[in-house]
Amino acid sequence: MAAVRFLLTSIFWLFSLSLFSQDYLLELKNLSSELNLNELVNVETATDSNSALKTQQELISILQSEGYLEARSTLEVDSPVIQLQVELGPQYIWSKLSRGNVEPEALRALGYKLDLRTKKAVNVREIRKLREAVLRYYENRGYPFAGVYYDSLSMDGNLVSASMMVDLNQYITIDSLVIVGAEKVKPSYLYNSLNIFPGKAYSEEKFVQSPARLSEIPFVKQLKKPEVLFSKEGAQVFLYLEDKKANDIQGIVGFLPNAQTGKITLSGDVKLKLMNALGQGEYFNMNWRKLQENTQDLKVEATYPYLFNTSFGLEGKVFLYRRDTLFNTFERSVGANYRLSQYHSVVVKLGAINNNILSTYGLQNASSLPEYADVQTSQYSLGYKGLKLDYRYNPRSGRDIALEFGAGNRRIQQNPDINPELYDSLQLRSSQYRIQLQADRYFALFKRSSFKTGINGGSILGEEVFQNELYRLGGIQNLR
């Protein structure tokens, strides 16, 4: 009966506090030591009753993290003052916290040194955090049923000693990925995309991340979240997917009459994108555009990921540009990329650029070189790509960075229709360096909107650069 009376009294007391609309002056009073409580928690000079309760909970949590495990407090109201009275109790200190049977490699990987905790206050939150970190370490290394606990707990006054122990239970490896539904994607591609391989240790972290990684694959759709089945043979991960159309072709093709000859020429703008045609996640993209009579460009690029079931991939690019009757540019490159992690990769490329003058009409008797020249450049480049977006194909937050450094040899060819003396002041063979950066940052706005900032630029370092060697950036597709 007394317990019921105390409970009802407490409820009505708390209810009465919440009804007050006036502000209170909160005072902290330490009943058991000289410890200055105002240094541990920020207290406003004037606060309402709900803030007083929040401050009480915050203060007890802080005191327990400082080793005062038996700290307790009471609130006394004497309007307009609320007094928070605290009894600290003894401060408990670590005499020894040993690793028990926890592997030293586990603690080093997590950045913990238990011996440094000797003579330090017992921190309840840190103990819980350490236990959870060790548990995750083993869960991601083949022990999903591991248990972590503290053993051999002993106390000598306020000195505490304990050992951390782990029960590993069964070691689990990946048996297989079971694809339910989708038929066009091969398991080898999903192994690499999810970083889950048969025979490797089961990782709870990789399994939890698998839905997000699957959502970034444009040619499959998740029907429901993956499931895992544990058995004596290992873990079977079930992926419920269906094939999704990711190929795309669009464009317009027409005929354009030549104003001088009257002949009909082909014109248009065509885009072709093919993905996963071979089931390995390969990508092919082509864009041909000819909107003016003698000007056209062609871009072709292709990638093949996870070559021979490794983190290496291949990529290639061809770019052909013709500017009226002035010049044409032919670029090609081939490279190998290596995936460092889910968000980072590096690429090494070998490329060449040919710039040629198309017409020398009127240049035979020129007294100076034109703005265009016949230039050949070979280049070796090293690049970095960092991609971390909430959703790769329609991001609301995250970043996308591509940085490339290139170095190579540049050779100016003397055109036989141009006076050779005009080349005397030029260094026909030289070194050339290129830097390119494309960086985008997305910021989420409201529920379905985002704000994008970005930079796209490059720099060519070397001897005199002709106009047909310059970067061509921008265009209508960059406008939003």
Image (cartoon, rainbow, N blue to C red):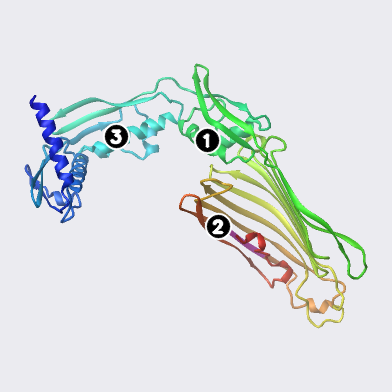
Does the magenta-highlighted stretch encompass residue 119? Answer: no
Name the secondary structure under disc 2: strand
Q: Are marks 3 and 1 in contact (CB under 8 Å)?
A: no
User: Compared to 331, does 233 lie above or below?
Assistant: above
Badge 3: few (under 14), some or many (20 or more) residues near its Cα, within 10 Å? Answer: few
Give the quadrant of the N terminus: top left
Mark 3 or 1, nearer chain start: 3
Give the quadrant of the C terminus: bottom right
Q: Which residue is mark 3?
A: 128
Q: Quadrant of residue 116?
A: top left
Residue 265 % position (x, y):
87, 60
Disc nearest the viewer among 2 and 1: 1
Residue 453 % position (x, y):
52, 60
Name the secondary structure under disc 3: helix
Disc nearest the viewer among 3 and 1: 1
Mark 2 or 1, nearer chain start: 1
User: Compared to 234, does 157 lie above or below?
Assistant: below
Highlighted magenta segment, given as a residue range: 432-440
Badge 2: few (under 14), some or many (20 or more) residues near its Cα, within 10 Å? Answer: some
Residue 311 % position (x, y):
60, 39
User: Compared to 66, does 232 lie above or below?
Assistant: above
Q: Residue 464: in sight, yes or no? A: yes
Q: Which residue is mark 1?
A: 211
Give the Cα separation between the discs numbered 2 and 1.
26 Å
Residue depicted at x 82% and y 71%:
414
Which amino acid type is shown beneath numbered disc 2?
Ala
Q: Which residue is mark 2?
A: 439
Residue 277 % position (x, y):
72, 38
Which amino acid type is shown beneath numbered disc 3?
Arg
User: Compared to 423, does 294 lie above or below?
Assistant: above
